[in-house]
Image: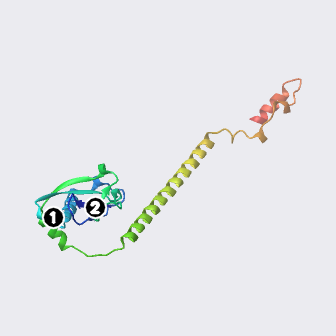
């Protein structure tokens, strides 16, 4: 999730639910402008100004300590905070307010559900990768068996030189060669 707020002024917070794997760079410019305009319009001081700066970052980057005043937040990694200038744009805010829908969801439960969904996805990917790895190992083993001479060299079918009884003439060797072919 991505968090938006007017920089250095009190304002509402806007949370944007990102699709899995999405980064801040993947958010379309129009959507950034919509969220930033909405935050500006819902700022007591910011809505009176022609332009303000809006900051946005991943919600995991937000840091709240006991020493902070109500409504104040910090950042774990300030370098991951983006800042953009937003000018007054009532048209965007009017369009957004037309589609406004009041909901009071259990945010904690929604977050748990989403984390559970991500865990199940990761588990399925891990199982798929393990299957692919096992299949690749089996294919490699079969390839190695095809290239191996072990199936040709059966010890039960082999004859030791000591087992071949020699004769004065070469007849024993000829009989052995006939058997071989």
Question: Quarter-wise, where is residue 41 in the image?
Answer: bottom left
User: Who's the residue at 22% across and 53% down the image?
Assistant: 83
Image quadrant where residue 99 sits: bottom left
What residue did someone put label 2 on? 72
Mark 2–mark 1 Cα distance, whole angstroms, equals 16 Å
Residue 7 pos. (x, y %) = 21, 57
Q: Nearer the viewer, residue 124 or 161?
A: 124
Tag 1: Cα neighbours inside 10 Å, few (<14), some, or many (≥20)? some
Give the residue at x 22% y 73%: 100
As drawn, the label of residue 84 is none
Which residue ends up furthest to the top in the rendered image? 168
Q: Is residue 65 left or right of residue 89?
A: right
Name the image quarter holding the N terminus: bottom left
Q: SS at mark 2?
A: loop
Whether tag 2 and tag 1 are in contact, CB under 8 A, the answer is no
**Where residue 101 appears, x then y in whole percent?**
24, 75
Instruction: Give the x, y percent position of residue 56.
Output: 26, 57
Viewed as shown, does residue 145 lie left or right of 84?
right
SS assignment at label 1: loop
- Tell which residue pokes out farthest to the front in this image: 67
Check the image and report above or below for 165 versus 13: above
Residue 124 position (above or below residue 169): below
173 horizontally vs 111: left or right: right
Q: Name the residue under label 1.
A: 45
Q: Earlier in the sequence, mark 2 or mark 1?
A: 1
Q: Residue at x 12, y 63 (%)?
A: 89
Which quadrant holds the C terminus? Answer: top right
């Amino acid at each position: 999730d991505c968090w938006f707020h007017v920089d250095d002024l009190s304002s509402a917070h806007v949370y944007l639910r990102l699709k899995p794997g999405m980064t801040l760079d993947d958010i379309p410019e129009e959507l950034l402008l919509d969220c930033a305009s909405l935050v500006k319009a819902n700022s007591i001081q910011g809505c009176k100004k022609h332009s303000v700066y809006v900051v946005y970052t991943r919600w995991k980057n937000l840091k709240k300590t006991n020493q902070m005043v109500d409504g104040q937040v910090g950042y774990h990694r300030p370098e991951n905070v983006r800042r953009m200038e937003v000018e007054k744009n009532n048209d965007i805010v009017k369009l957004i307010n037309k589609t406004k829908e009041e909901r009071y969801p259990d945010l904690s439960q929604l977050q748990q559900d989403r984390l559970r969904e991500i865990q199940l996805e990761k588990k399925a990917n891990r199982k798929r990768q393990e299957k692919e790895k096992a299949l690749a190992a089996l294919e490699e083993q079969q390839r190695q068996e095809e290239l191996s001479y072990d199936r040709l060299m059966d010890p039960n079918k082999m004859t030791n030189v000591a087992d071949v009884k020699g004769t004065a003439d070469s007849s024993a060797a000829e009989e052995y060669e006939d058997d071989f072919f």
